[in-house]
Amino acid sequence: MNSYALELDRLTFQYPSYPGLPARPLFKDLSLQIRTGEFVIILGAPDAGKTTLSRVIMDLLPRYSGGVRTGRVLLKGKDVDDWDPADLLAAGGLLFQDPEEQILTTRCDSEAAFSLESLGIPPEEMEVRVRNALAWAGMEDFAGRDPSLLSGGEQKRILLAAVRARDPEFWIMDETLEELDEAVKEKILHTLTEEGKTVLLFASKQVDLFDRFPHRSFLLKNGVLEELPRENREGRLLEEGLQYEGFGGQVPPEGVEPDTPSGAGDRPVFLEARGLSFHYPGGDFSLEISRLVLYRGETTALLGANGSGKSTLARILTGLLKPQEGKLFSPGSGAPRVLLEPDDLKRQSSYLFQNPDYQLFLPTLEEELVYGLKSPDREARAAEAVERFHLPDPEAPPALLSYGARKRLQGALAYMQPRPLLILDEGDSGLSFSDFFNLYHRLRDRGVTILLITHHRPLAEMLSHRILTMERGRIISEVRP
Amino acid sequence: MKGTRRFDPRPKIILLAAGAVFFFLPLRLEVLGAGLMLLLVPGGLVLKTRLLRVLSSILPILILVALLTPFFYRQGTPIWQMGETVVLTLRGLEETGRLLIRFTGITAVFALFYLTTPAERFLSALEWYGLPFRAALVMSLTLRFIPSLFTLYQRVEDAHSLRRAGELADRNGFFRRFRNLLPTLTSVLIQAVKKIGPLSMSLELQGVGLSSRRTRFVRLPRFRDVAFQFLLVLLILSLLVTVLVIFPQLWYNGAS
C-alpha cells in the first residue's frame, strides 16, 4: 500500500489569458508529498492560488476553467485522472471557500445526504449517518432548515457535515475554518487528527489553534511551495504577513492602533439604538437589543457564534433592514437627538459584505472605482486607491480577480466614497493579516466609526475600543479590552 | 404553511401544470382575473409577504408591459385618437390586461408551488412520474435557484443601495429605480454566471453522473396514503373543465 495520500509531481498550472489579466503559470514545478494520516497546512496570501490548487488536486481544473496543467497529481499512488469517480467520491472530500457555491439542496439534512445518495447508501443507513454528521457539526437542530438562509459559518458547518457523513479518508479544506466559532474549529481538527484522516488545509493566516495539532506547514508564494520547518516558521510567516505576533501583548501594527483608549463618555455618541426588535418572517430567530451606542471614531468589535445575529444587527444599523420596533438616533448639532430613518442610515454607511461581489458590476477595475463620482480628481484618487489597496492593472475585469483582490477592491470602493460609519462584516475572512491590516488602516485613517464583525477574538481585542458579544440575537456582554 | 408543505408534490405537480395552462387559455379577461384572485388570495394568506416579495420582483417588467403594450394594437374600438391616428384602443387595453394577468399568474403559480415544496420532494416526485434522474435534477435545480437568484438580487440590491447613497443619491425622480436596475441586474448576472462553474464542480464532487444506482434520502409516501389528494386535485380540475365547457361565454371571442 502506498504510504502517501497525496503526491504532487512537478505540477504546473496556468489559466487562460483575459484582457488586463495576462496568463502566467500560477504554479510551476510544484512538488509535495503528504503521508496518509498527516495534517498539512498550506498558507498563502489571498492571491497565491490556494483555491486553484485545491481544485487541481481533485481533478476539477482545468476541466471547468480552461487553462493548462502539466505534471501529475497522485492520490494514494494513482494518478487522479485514472481514479474511478465513485471511488474518488468515497475517498476524498473538498470543501470550497465560499459555501454558497457548493450548496445544492433546500434542506440541511438533504444536503448532508446528497453524496450518500450518489454512492447508493441504503436509506436507513443514510439517516443514521446524516443525523450523526449534523450532530458532529453542531447542526442537529437545523436538519429541516434551508441552507441558503443560514449565515456563512453555518453553511460551512452543513457542508462539513455533508463530508463527514461520507467519511472519506482525505479532506481538503479551502479556508473552511474561517468564520467558524473557536470551539467548532477545535472539534473538527481534533476529530480528524484523532481518527487519522489526511487533512490538507488551505489558510490565509496562521492561528494559534493550528499549533495544538501536529502538522507540517508550507508557504505558497509565487507559484512555489516552501516547507516551513517549525524552528523558523514564525519568522517567515511574520515576514509574509500571514502571522501576527502582537496579539499576546495587544500590540497593534504600526498605523492601525486605536488612537486613544477610551472609556464610555470620552467620545461623542455617533449612533444610538434603543429597543430594537427584529424577526425574519417565518423564522424562529429574533433580535432584541435594548440599547446600543456607537461612539464617534471608535472601533467596536462584534463577536458571537454563527447565526447569533451579528450581520442582522449590522444591516439594521446601516438601514438595510428596518426593525419592527425600536429607533435609531444620532446626536444633533444641538442637544436634541435626531431620529434616523433607513435612508439616513444608508447615506452615512459603508458596508464591506462577506461576499465582495455584490457591489461589483463594471467591466474594469478603474470604472468600478470612479463609478458615480463627480469630483475632477476622481481618476487620481482611483490611481491612489489602486496603489494603496495593492490592486492589479486598472483595466483588469473585477469579476475575474482572485477572492483576496476582490476583497481589497471592496475596501477601495469604501475608500473612494468615505462615509462616517464602516461595517467590516467578517472583514478579515480570507485575507492575510497584512492585507487586512492594510485595508483597516487605509479606511481607519479617515477617522470613521467602525463596527468590526469577526470570529477572531485576539484581533478584536487588539483593534477595538469595545467588544460586544452576541448570543441568540441579544448582546450578552460589553467589555473594553 | 406546514399544511401546504405536507401536501404531496405529485398531485401538486398536476395543479402546477393546470395552473400554467389556465393562464394561457383564450378566456375572457374577467375569467382570467377571477382565476388570478383565486390564486392570490389564499396564496397570500398562506405565504404572506413572501408571495408579495416574489411578485414585486417582476414589477419592473409589468410596468414596461403596461406602458408599451397598449400602443401596439390598432384594431378594436378606438378610445384615444390624435387626428386620424388611433393611439389607443379597447383591444389594446384588454390585451395589456391579459398579458399582465398571464405573467403575474404564471409567476404566482410557480412561486406558490416552489415556496411550498422542498426541491428534494419535487425531485422525487418527478422521478415518480418516470423522469430520468438527471432531467429531474436539472428541473429541481432550476426551481431551487429561482428563489436563490431572488435572494441574490435582494443582497445585490442592498449592496448597491448603500453604494448609491451619498454622492450618488442626488438622482431622484420617477425613473431612478429603472436607472438603478441596470447595475443591480449586471451584478446579479455576473454572480449567476460565476455560479455555473462552481455549481458544476459541486455536482461532480457530490457524485452526480456516477453510473451506480442512486438511493433516495427523501422518500415519498405510498400512493395509497395520498390517493385522496390526487382525487381532490382531479375533482377540482374536472369541475373547472366542466364549467369552461358548459359556459362558452367564458371564452374570449376576439371582439372589443
Image (cartoon, coloured by chain):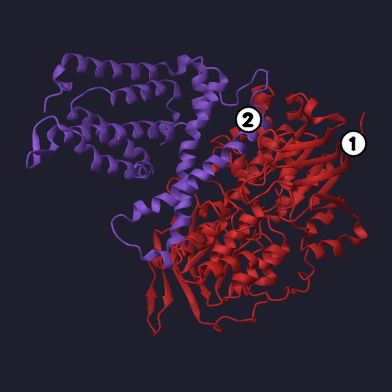
Chain colours: A red, B purple
Pinpoint residue B213: horizontal percent, then vertical percent.
65, 17
- The residue that appears at 79% across and 46% down in the rendered structure is A27
Few, some or many C-alpha atoms within 10 Å of disc 2 (few <14, some 14-19, many ≥20)?
Answer: many
Few, some or many C-alpha atoms within 10 Å of disc 1 (few <14, some 14-19, many ≥20)?
Answer: some
Kind of element beneath mark 1: strand
Labelled disc at residue A381: none
> Which residue is under mark 2?
A114
> Quadrant of the rendered structure where residue B68 is?
top left
The answer to whether marks 2 and 1 mark residues whose Cβ atoms lie closer than 8 Å is no
Q: Is residue A34 visible?
A: yes
| Left or right: A283, with B230 as reference point | right
Work out how far the residue at label 2 is from the one at label 1, CA to CA, in angstroms.
29 Å
Pinpoint residue B232: horizontal percent, then vertical percent.
34, 19
> Which residue is under mark 1?
A4
What is the chain identity of the residue bearing mark 2? A
| Left or right: A246, with B10 as reference point | right
**What amino acid does circle 1 point to?**
Tyr
